[in-house]
Image: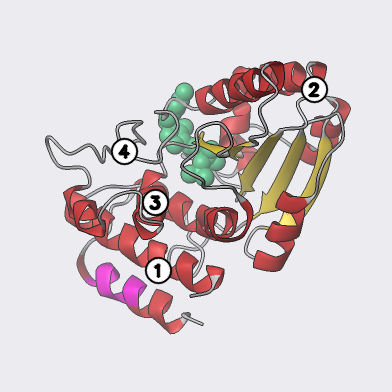
Amino acid sequence: MSSEELAKKIKLRAWNMGYEAKASHMSGNFSMADIIAVLYYDCINISEDDEIRDRVVLSKGHCCAVMYALLAEMGYFPKEELKTFGRNGSRLACHISYKVPGVEWSTGSLGHGISVASGIALNGKLNNKSYHVYTICGDGECDEGSVWETAMFAAHHKLDNFTVIIDANNMQAMGNIEDILKLEPLADKWQAFGWDVLEVDGHDHKAIKEAVRHQSKKMPKVIVAHTIKGKDVSFMENNLWWHYQVPFGEYYQRAIDEIKGNLI
Ligand SMILES: Cc1ncc(C[n+]2csc(CCOP(=O)(O)OP(=O)(O)O)c2C)c(N)n1
């Protein structure tokens, strides 16, 4: 299986999970699927040895369905359990939960995951650990003040074992980033805070891989990954309605057909 196939696979699983659980945030799940597929397939150390395994914190914790699907694909827990997503008593909560094997930290309150992740990275530095810490953050999430505290903190401590990947899909819950709270020039802002900044097409697996593998020296790294919200489903792409709309009716099968049609 290629990382491209893995990305499509986890989208299909997430869509089915969302349909059964009547869960939203599917379009934000789809914009980041390629990023996490490349991360786990091609880049990070997923050793079981706690001393050396890389850490991944999903800061945009509302988009947990693709992450759970990915972790199940990677063997962290049985795929069968994905059917319990969002059910009473299930550990697969609709915002990501640390109770699920492979999940580093529970998130959902935007701006928290990235802050915690920087602390984990500092801990690694102070204790001479070889692990790298990655966090996936939304662009809307960058409205949170704690994101910019982290930007200062990580640069101050020269955390070159820390990578933030921004899923820059240009939308948040209630509208376009540009209209709600302008972020541009986003890359320049991170650079001004003392970060090594890379920009990629967040659906180009080769470009994502190269950016993730790029080793920054004495500074943290941010990858601004330009993505499309709802990627690969025509009626969801860049359509705000699908931020909170749950999969239903005729849309259910149409999305599956489109994602499968795109299977490489
Ligand atoms: C502190 C906080 N405020 C508000 C919300 C509600 N909320 C959930 S998703 C979302 C939009 C986030 O936008 P973005 O980070 O760009 O995520 P994406 O568009 O990728 O889904 C908001 C405001 C939240 N989860 N946490």
For the residues bearing labels 1 and 4, Cβ distance under 8 angstroms = no
User: In the rendered structure, which disc, 2 or 1, sits on the residue that comes first in sequence?
Assistant: 1
Question: Which corner quadrant of the image does residue 27 belong to?
Answer: bottom left
For the residues bearing labels 2 and 4, Cβ distance under 8 angstroms = no
Q: Nearer the viewer, mark 2 or mark 4?
A: 4
- Would you call the spot at circle 4 few (<14 residues within 10 Å), some (14-19), or many (20 or more)? some
User: In the rendered structure, which disc, 2 or 4, sits on the residue that comes first in sequence?
Assistant: 4
What segment is highlighted magenta in the picture? 250-256
Q: Is residue 262 above or below residue 206?
A: below
Is residue 12 inside the magenta stretch? no
Q: Amino acid at mark 4?
A: Val
Q: Amino acid at mark 1?
A: Lys
Q: Residue at x 85, y 36 (%)?
A: 188
Q: Main secondary structure of the magenta part?
A: helix
Q: Position of residue 234 (x, y in %)?
A: 47, 71
**Nearer-the-camera pick, 73 or 246:** 73
**Nearer-the-camera pick, 41 or 225:** 41
Q: Return the mark for residue 9.
A: 1
Q: Return the mark for residue 155.
A: 2
Q: Return the mark for residue 100.
A: 4
Q: Nearer the viewer, mark 1 or mark 4?
A: 4
**Distance CA(mark 2)–CA(mark 1):** 36 Å
Q: Return the mark for residue 173.
A: none
Q: For the residue with label 2, is its CB less than 8 Å from the closest atom of ligand 1?
A: no
